[in-house]
């Protein structure tokens, strides 16, 4: 049974209101996740939960962000890529007991390891904290030809039509995408948008990144970490 016209109008208004609220909440979470600094309280709490060198890794992460925040983009890319590539590669099943889990940068630092998604996510949010705009970066799913498996890297674009630079946990040297014929791009995304790779005329924009549930989950966890430890 269809609702009466007045009921339909009210329902439509309510739906638009809910959509607007959710969009605002997502934007707020992204802003917190990308810009909020760490704190001494966070480092102390992390050390209590993960005894050992977790506090040192987090402190070094914080120092790196502040020390290179005003550097050029090439130096930022280099130091961030080197910093996270020192972490151990651990597959999700062994690390988190799940087939596919996207960790926050803090989770990767405290556990001193992660898989390709974790490296890429950690690099992305670290570079965001260092002032590189989201529109210059994309987390990119590729097929690693030699490994014959799915893989994720971080791509940096100096301009929208520029050949991207690839930050990869498998290769310490940052290279252009044209130099990485061992990688076949499939799709890419950043905080806002989603693209399908290798379409006629270039990558095809296919919607908002909100369609990726695991991406929204990790953004929510990062936002929660930042807020809870700064209260």
Image (spheres, rainbow, N blue to C red):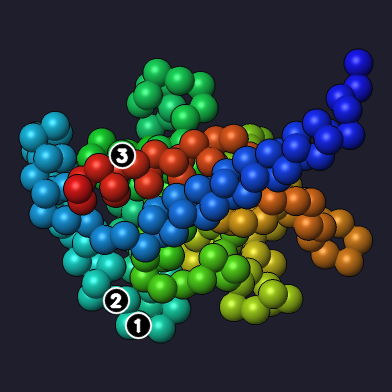
Where residue 101 appears, x then y in whole percent? Answer: 47, 30
Marks 1 and 2, how far apart at CA: 5 Å
Where residue 183 appears, x then y in whole percent? Answer: 66, 51
Residue 72 visible in this rendered orientation of the protein: yes
Q: In this view, does 23 lie above or below 37?
A: above
The quadrant holding residue 81 is bottom left
Check contact, mark 1 vs mark 2: CB within 8 A. yes
Q: Is residue 86 above or below residue 47?
A: below
Q: How many labels does the image show?
A: 3
Within 10 angstroms of label 1, few (less than 14), some, or many (20 or more) residues? few
Q: Is residue 114 above or below residue 21?
A: above
- Please give the residue where the numbered disc 3 appears in the rendered image: 107
Name the one closer to the observer, 124 or 13.
13
Dot label at residue 216: none
Asked if residue 128 lies left or right of residue 19, the reply is left
What SS does tag 3 mark?
helix
Residue 188 visible in this rendered orientation of the protein: no
Name the one closer to the observer, 112 or 226.
226
Residue drawn at (37%, 63%) of the image = 35
Screen quadrant of the N terminus = top right
The quadrant holding residue 83 is bottom left
- Please give the residue where the numbered disc 1 appears in the rendered image: 71
Residue drawn at (81%, 39%) of the image = 9
Q: Which of marks 3 and 2 is nearer the N terminus?
A: 2
- Please give the residue where the numbered disc 2 appears in the rendered image: 68
What SS does tag 1 mark?
loop
Name the one closer to the observer, 147 or 230.
230
Where residue 71 appears, x then y in whole percent? Answer: 35, 82
The quadrant holding residue 52 is top left
Where residue 127 appears, x then y in whole percent? Answer: 41, 65
């Amino acid at each position: 049974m269809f609702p009466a016209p007045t009921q339909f109008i009210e329902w439509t208004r309510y739906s638009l209101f809910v959509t607007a609220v959710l969009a605002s909440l997502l934007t707020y979470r992204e802003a917190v996740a990308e810009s909020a600094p760490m704190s001494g309280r966070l480092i102390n709490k992390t050390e209590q939960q993960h005894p050992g060198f977790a506090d040192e890794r987090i402190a070094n992460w914080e120092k790196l962000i502040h020390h290179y925040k005003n550097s050029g983009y090439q130096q930022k890319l280099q130091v961030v890529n080197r910093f996270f590539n020192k972490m151990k590669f651990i597959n999700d099943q062994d690390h988190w007991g799940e087939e596919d889990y996207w960790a926050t940068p803090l989770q990767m630092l405290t556990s001193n390891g992660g898989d390709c998604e974790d490296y890429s996510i950690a690099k992305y949010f670290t570079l965001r904290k260092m002032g590189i705009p989201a529109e210059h970066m994309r987390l990119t799913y590729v097929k690693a030809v030699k490994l014959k498996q799915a893989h994720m890297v971080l791509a940096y674009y100096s301009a929208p039509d520029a050949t991207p630079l690839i930050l990869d946990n498998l290769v310490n040297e940052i290279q252009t995408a044209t130099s990485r014929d061992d990688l076949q791009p499939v799709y890419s995304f950043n905080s806002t948008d989603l693209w399908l790779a290798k379409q006629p005329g270039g990558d095809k924009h296919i919607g908002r990144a909100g369609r990726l549930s695991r991406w929204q989950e990790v953004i929510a966890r990062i936002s929660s970490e930042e807020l809870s430890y700064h209260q």
